[in-house]
Image (spheres, rainbow, N blue to C red):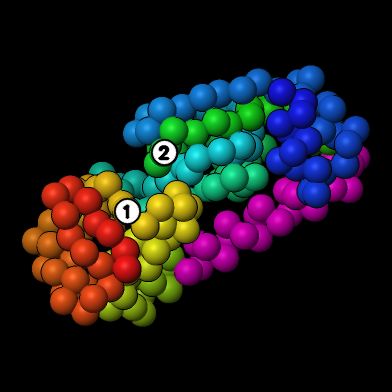
Amino acid sequence: MKEILKEKFRNILQPELIDEMADKGRLMSVTEGKIMIDYGKYIKEIPMVLSGSVRIIREDDKGNELFLYYLGERDTCAMSLTCCTQHKKSEIKAIAETDTEVWMIPLQYMDLWMKYSTWRQFIFNSYNLRFEELINALDSVAFLRMDERLMNYLLDIKQNTGSFTISKTHQEIATEMNTSRVVVSRLLKKLENEDKIVLHRNKIEIL
C-alpha cells in the first residue's frame, strides 16, 4: 500500500509523511452509488481519494438536495475536514460516482501532521479549491441560465470520471440540480439539437 501512496502523493507530500500515512490509515473501497458520508453522522476519518470520483451534495431544510462539487484522485473534502475539526455532525452527503478507493486517515492525525509543511499546504490548498468550487456553484445558480448550468454539470462529471458517456437518468440529474425532470428533459433535448450532446437510453454522450 505504501508504494501506491508514494505513487499518488510523491509530488505533493514529503516521504516521511507518506510513510506515516501508510502506517496510520486504512483503505476503503466503495462501489458506485454507495453513500460514503451521510447527513447527521460524525466524521472520524479524513478521506483522501486514491482513484474514482465522489459526488458531494448538501440538503436544505425542506429535504431538497443540491450538488456542490466532485472529489477526484488526490483530493480530500474540505467540508469533511471542517466537521472533523469542529466535532460536528456531517452537513453533506458523499456518494461514490464510480467505483472508488479512498485512504482513510484517523481524525487525530490532521493536527499532529501540521508539523509537516507539505501537509499544511495540502490542507490549505484543499480548503481553497473547495471554496472556489462552492463560489462557482453559487454563481452558477445565481447568474447562469439553466441550460448553461446543466452543461457545466455534465462537463464536471466528464472531467471527474474521465468518460464522455454519463450514465444517469433525467430524474437523477433533476434531483441533483434541484429542478424538475421535465425541465431537464427539455434542456437536454435543446443541447442535443445544438450538437453538444447525444441522448441515449439512460445515457448521455458529450460531444
User: Tag 1, which secondary structure?
Assistant: strand
Measuring from the top left, give residue 60's x and y in whole percent: 32, 49
Q: Which residue is mark 2?
A: 98
Please say whether residue 126 is one of the residues in the magenta stretch.
yes
Please say whether residue 197 is one of the residues in the magenta stretch.
no
Q: Where the C terminus falls, by quadrant? A: bottom left
Q: Which residue is mark 1?
A: 165
Q: Is residue 141 left or right of residue 101?
A: left
Q: Is residue 17 left or right of residue 194?
A: right
What residue type is disc 2 on? Answer: Thr
Of discs 2 and 1, which sits in the foreground? 1
Measuring from the top left, give residue 201's x and y in whole percent: 14, 50
Q: Quadrant of residue 32?
A: top left
| Residue at the spot 31% in from the left edge and 64% down from the top edge | 206
Measuring from the top left, give residue 76's x and y in whole percent: 61, 44
Boundaries of the magenta span = 114-136
> Between 84 and 73, which is closer to the camera in this rendering?
73
